[in-house]
Image (cartoon, grey):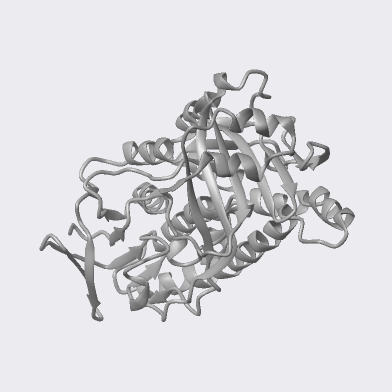
Amino acid sequence: MGNGRLRVAIVGGGIGGLSAANALVRRDVEVAVYEQAAELGEVGAGVLITPNSVRQLVRMGLGEAVNELGGRVGDGSRYCRADGTKVGAIRTADSEGAHGVYGMHRADLLGALAAALPAGIVHTGHRCTGFDQDAGSARLMFANGASAEADVVIAADGIHSVLQPHVVEPASPVYSGHVAYRGLIDATAVPGWPRGVHLVWMGERKHFMVYPVRGGDLLNYVGFLPSDEAAEETWSGQGDPDALRAAFEGWDPLIGELLARVEQTYWWGLFDREPLARWTDGRLTLLGDAAHPMLPHLGQGANQSIEDGVALAVLLAGRTAAEAPEALRAYERFRRPRTAKVQEGARANGRRYDSQYEDLGQRDAEISASGELRAWLYDHDVERTAGEFART
């Protein structure tokens, strides 16, 4: 790094970090990504990519990859009661119908983001162990003995961020009282399964959802169950398929048909954090789960990370090293209100899905009216609004 352009170092080679790298490269910012793993890879299974980030991925040149690798979610997507009775339709596009919702395998999305970057930007095997900064630059230290200097450091290193304490006292984890079982099923193993739909079943203190990934060849399922034990924040805990089947026994037979094919499942505890007091200190800022971890009940964790990266790119474009700290403060002012609202919205939606209402009619009415919230999420053009914010 070092040719007069603004130099940005990103710690973390996940969806958020690589999205930020792609957005910055588009704006002629010099970027280096440092990932602790020996090779890029995404644990977990499926992720929903919604229109607010799809439009940004299209602008990065990834529209074809999303179409080919994703499972388009379309008509027939619906919220149901436990017995399969329809409660309401699931919104599957923005208000103009220009961008849709896709289920994607996390590894597929990560691979597409990495392939879109110029060679030499991503450095694997770099576990960050230290950070310091002064008025002129920021420095990173790594466990392999390497170091790096940059004008800006973006911490995209997740909910257990090693850089977050350099910005703010970390908020304590908030356990939701639930764990999630997840996995993938070959779509051909479940004959008659409705193709290209996102289905959510809602019951007492638990819910179940399924959506397509990998062009519709695979079905991604997630079962959310109450648990008094705060399971680890991990994607790879081994779950018991029989326990999962027993938890949803007596629900819609369609669920039973799918779960009968489950041979291996994984589980993780659901945690979020209260909104942080700040995201930025000098030349260091936080992105994605390092800044605003949220429950998955609006499907916005990855999508808000992508929005963060685009916003940062817009606000850093054309800035000098001396101007970078103010650009990072502007990013925080711009993004914090939206992500705080999404964090709270995810909690509220979890209460709806888990039927935590005395009157289920009220829950069903809120679910049926949820299109307004989805429109607010999906219609947001972070690139355009960040540009407008920069000009104010």
Q: Is residue 344 above or below residue 179?
A: below
Note whether residue 197 is visible: no
Q: Residue 341: where, in percent of width, then height?
A: 64, 66
Residue 148 is left or right of residue 259, and the answer is: left
Q: Residue 246: where, in percent of width, then height?
A: 63, 42
Front residue of 341 and 266: 266
Which residue: 65% across, 27% down?
257
Determine which quarter of the picture holds residue 361.
Answer: bottom right
Q: Residue 168: where, in percent of width, then height?
A: 41, 80
Q: Is residue 125 above or below residue 312?
A: above
Which residue: 64% across, 45% down?
247
Image quadrant where one finds the N terminus:
bottom left
Q: Residue 139: where, in percent of width, then height?
A: 21, 70
Note whether residue 162 is visible: yes
Front residue of 275 and 267: 267
Front residue of 78 and 357: 357
Which residue: 62% across, 37% down?
210
Residue 298 is left or right of residue 372, and the answer is: left
